[in-house]
Image (spheres, rainbow, N blue to C red):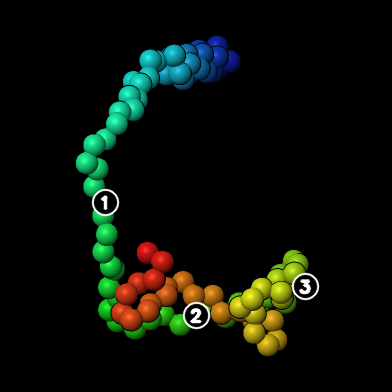
Amino acid sequence: MKKIRLMAITTVVALALASNVQAKKSSYEETQVSNGGSISGNIMFKGNVPAPIMEDLSKGKNAEFCATHPDTQEGGIRPRQKVVVQDGKLKNA
């Protein structure tokens, strides 16, 4: 009895998933845009800039290759900056 119930549930779920695949998807129509706009501006950063994470490159799988990174400092340490601020503006945003 449990096998029949499990097979019935499995069949219903499989049919439900298959019918979703068969559903017609709305097509996207590409058109030309005249007088299109653009967005520009600056993102200002207020507060203390977080200190960089000091990453020890000698502990990785490929320490010799990682040590060639241009930011690598003495001892195989590389500062990794998550937030970069220049002149009060968020850089690379």
Crowd band around label 3 with a 10 angstrom C-alpha radius: few (<14), some (14–19), many (20+): few
Q: Does residue 64 show up?
A: yes
Q: Badge 3 is on which residue? A: 64
Q: Quadrant of residue 88?
A: bottom left
Instruction: Indicate the position of residue 90 as horizontal and vertical percent values.
Output: 35, 72
Left or right of 18 in this view: 66: right
Q: Badge 1 is on which residue? A: 38
**Camera-side mark, 1 or 2:** 1
Q: Residue at x 56, y 79 (%)?
A: 79
Secondary-structure class at tag 1: loop
Contact between labelled residues 3 and 2, with CB atoms less than 8 Å apart? no
Mark 1 to mark 3: distance in Å?
45 Å
Instruction: Indicate the position of residue 20 as horizontal and vertical percent values.
Output: 42, 18
Secondary-structure class at tag 2: loop
Q: Badge 2 is on which residue? A: 52
Q: Residue at x 29, y 68 (%)?
A: 43
Left or right of 83 in this view: 68: right
Secondary-structure class at tag 3: helix
Question: Quadrant where the C terminus lies?
Answer: bottom left
